Amino acid sequence: MRKSNYFKWFTLLSVVFGITAVVSFSSCKKDSDDPNTDDPIASFQYSIDESNWLQVSFTNNSQNATSYSWDFGDGFNSTEKDATHVYAAAGDYMVALTALNDAGTSKIYSKTITLTDPNSAKKLLTGEESKTWKLFREGTSMSLGPNPDDPAAWWPGLENDGARPCLYAQTFTFHNDGKYVFNDAGFFWGEYGVFDGQDWYETCFPAEAEYMINKDGDDVSAWLSGEHTFTYDPSTGTVTLDGDGAWIGIPKLGPAGETTVPLTSTSFNVDIVAGEGYDLMTLSFNYADAGFWLFQYVSYHDPSLEPDIVTIQPPYGEDLPDLTPEEMWNTFETSTSWEVLDTAGVYPGLGQAANGGMSFTMDVADPAGAGVNVGQYDRAGTYQELQFMMQNDIQFDNFTTVSVDVYVPSSNDYSGTLTKGIGVIIGEASQTEGWWNGHIQYDAEATVMDEWVTYTWNLDEPTSGPGGYTPFTRTDLDFFAISIGGGGHEAEGTFYVRNFTFN
């Protein structure tokens, strides 16, 4: 063969082989990108028919699949992509969807669905015609916490111990025709946050319109005995009360949080368990930022099982000896830099998480870069006060003001519930189970950031709190606290304090 022809054939063969290689490579690439050969992802959602609670429609959200197999959990199956199935009875069913691709690879997604006869579920709430519920008189009947997993972290709860006997006498009746009736049994409770400062605050008082005036002077008599309506969605466990002043649990609990006035509607969740002699209803209000309220109500089939209401509360704590100090201060420079405001009296102790939510460290460097060491105040959620429990009932004869130096960093995140609020609290704790129900407070709002500011208040001019007194009109005050960052339990932030002083 001539040399020139050899090179022509060699060049032609090279081109052919090159084209073949490109075609083969491209074909392989196409096969790997074929969605029918990728691993499938199985997924579905379902909805229960509004007119037939046994009929369920399943929407297939699977990907990379070409065939499907449904197992409805009751012995029936389907190969449709989207399926509708009618069950024979109420119950819990484990539904499984198998998604298969062309390569023979399969994936399974399963979910338990619950079918409840709305009529039978409603009858747990209303009975055949009506059903009356009362606060459970055994154990804790109400509590408050940050979420359903910790429902008593903020307030361990109310018991039938004589503290609020009127609440245990009130009744809440649900009728099968949608009527809801509240009976106050002749008395009402002076709820914290609603009746602050009134003579009947934190007591059981006559359920009469003349007393139903809240702390702002508003008429709240719509909360008294009355007839309203309700709706119940058994699939979600949601009950909605409609009508001016309709309530259950605590009257101040509205659909989105706490209120000081009656509303026209409120919603909550219920879970009812039928028992021997009585049925138990767990009722809850779940607020994203304001916490989780939990209540226990009971409806007795056998009245002989109902405990009596305790009407007299045993004494709590003890009266402390009086002390009239000439000086009372704490600089937080060291563990010994105090007078009367003993660091050992901080509850439950400096350097520890106060009530599980706020920690305080003494003897830290001044954040301004100068001066003596100070205290670092870290909010970690749950509680927000630096609390001092005194060993004496303090007499304030030698003081007229209270002050504290506060350094508010701009680096904190104030876009949520954390505020720049600063407060000093005075109250009574040795003989009062909940000091927050009767304290007074001195408030300010930080406007200067990243430097020390001294906040001073006249002791005879409290700015907030339910107490309605001054330190000069009480002889039993033994509790102090510094609160920075506002009342949001979950708000986190770091602040610095020094020179907590009574002058």
Image (cartoon, rainbow, N blue to C red):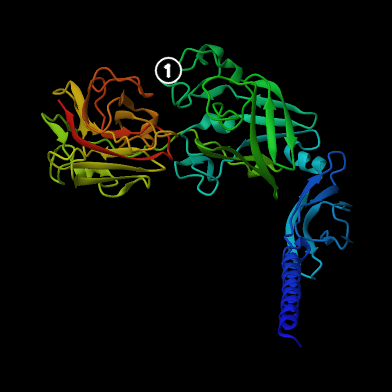
Q: Going 11% across and 31% down the picture, which residue do you hit?
A: 327
Q: Quarter of the image holding residue 94? A: bottom right
Q: Give the quarter of the figure containing the N terminus.
A: bottom right
Image height check: is 145 above or below 194? below
Percent of width and height locating residue 454: 20, 27
* Residue situated in front as seen by the camera: 491 or 81: 81
Percent of width and height locating residue 363: 17, 46
* Residue situated in front as seen by the camera: 476 or 57: 57
Percent of width and height locating residue 77: 88, 61
Q: Going 45% across and 45% down the picture, which residue do you hit?
A: 153
Going by the image, does 123 lie left or right of 214?
right
Can residue 116 be seen? Answer: no
Image height check: is 363 above or below 498? below
Of the residues shown, which amino acid type is indicated by label 1?
Gln
- Identify the residue position indicated by label 1 in the image: 198
Image height check: is 78 above or below 386? below
**How many numbered circles does the render carry?**
1
Give the secondary structure at mark 1. loop
Going by the image, does 143 lie left or right of 476?
right
Can residue 105 be seen? Answer: yes
Percent of width and height locating residue 154: 44, 41
Q: Give the quarter of the figure containing the C terminus.
A: top left
Q: Quarter of the image holding residue 50? A: top right
Q: Going 56% across and 13% down the picture, which residue do you hit?
A: 209
10 Å crowding of disc 1: few (<14), some (14-19), many (20+): some
Going by the image, does 230 lie left or right of 74?
left
Image height check: is 143 above or below 75? above
Residue furthest to the left: 326
